[in-house]
Image (cartoon, rainbow, N blue to C red):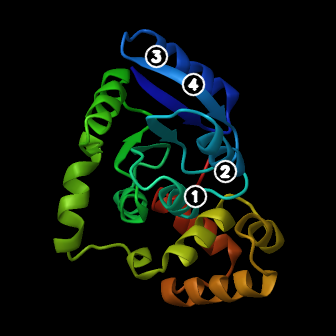
Amino acid sequence: MIRILIADDHAIVRGGLKQILATTADMVVTAEAGQGSEVIEKLRTCEVDLLLLDMTMPGISGVDLIRRVRAEEPALPVLVLSIHNEAQVASRALRAGATGYVTKDSDPEVLLAAIRKLADGGRFIDPKLVDAMVFEKHSGDVPPHEVLSDREFQVLQMLASGKSINDIADACALSAKTISTHKMRLMQKLGLGNNAEVIRYAIRHGLVGE
């Protein structure tokens, strides 16, 4: 039996995932988490074989949370289930330590196949993203945000989702001054002049969080 921790800040999404998993004979949901800190807490207190993780949650999330999970549980399979269907987002998640990546618009069969493959020690990338991820490094049309650091990329996403500098600082456990510096650098790298341009850029490239 594959024991799964579902981490998503939307109760309806968690409920839907539990219904999907309940149709199987080899999977069971043993814990749920609605924010990043809960994920770490549940991993410490519950028996879990696989973490099914949303990339965008309150508090610590995304790449930072994946790295924290990896530090706590080096061998735990981590399957990211995300609204983001952009190859760059998936690449960063996998580099941070995720072992699989599936988008939320995938068929349930794809999700179940991914869970089973990870539980068997394998890796899984959403079929819709494979080509983009394989060929993005060889394309002359690599998006400008490829040059951003992981933290700059995270700040870009959070700014685009409407969060303030102080909100981002709190979520990342950093000072507002540090976040402002990351913002300035990412805007320079992307040639953006103001917040409206940041939001338009993120929308155009499918980087806006939930």
Q: Which residue is mark 2?
A: 36
Q: CA distance from mark 4 to mark 3?
A: 14 Å
Q: Which residue is mark 4?
A: 30
Label 4–label 1 contact, CB within 8 A:
no
Q: Please identify, in this view, whether the residue under mark 1 or under mark 3 is nearer the observer.
A: 1
Answer few, some or many: residues within 10 Å of disc 4's Cα (few below 14, many 20 plus, some between 14 and 19). Answer: some
The percent position of residue 76, horizontal first and vertical second, equals 42, 46
Q: Please identify, in this view, whether the residue under mark 4 or under mark 3 is nearer the observer.
A: 4
Which numbered marker is on residue 20?
3
SS class, disc 2: helix
The percent position of residue 46, horizontal first and vertical second, equals 60, 34
- Decide which of tag 1 and tag 3 comes sooner along the chain: 3
- Decide which of tag 2 and tag 1 comes sooner along the chain: 2
The percent position of residue 189, horizontal first and vertical second, equals 50, 88
Label 2–label 1 contact, CB within 8 A:
yes
How many marks are shown on the rendered structure?
A: 4
Vertical relation: 20 (above or below) 149: above
- Decide which of tag 4 and tag 1 comes sooner along the chain: 4
Residue depicted at 65% across the width and 24% down the height = 12
Q: Which residue is mark 1?
A: 65
Q: Is residue 176 left or right of residue 188?
A: right
Q: Is residue 19 left or right of residue 23?
A: right
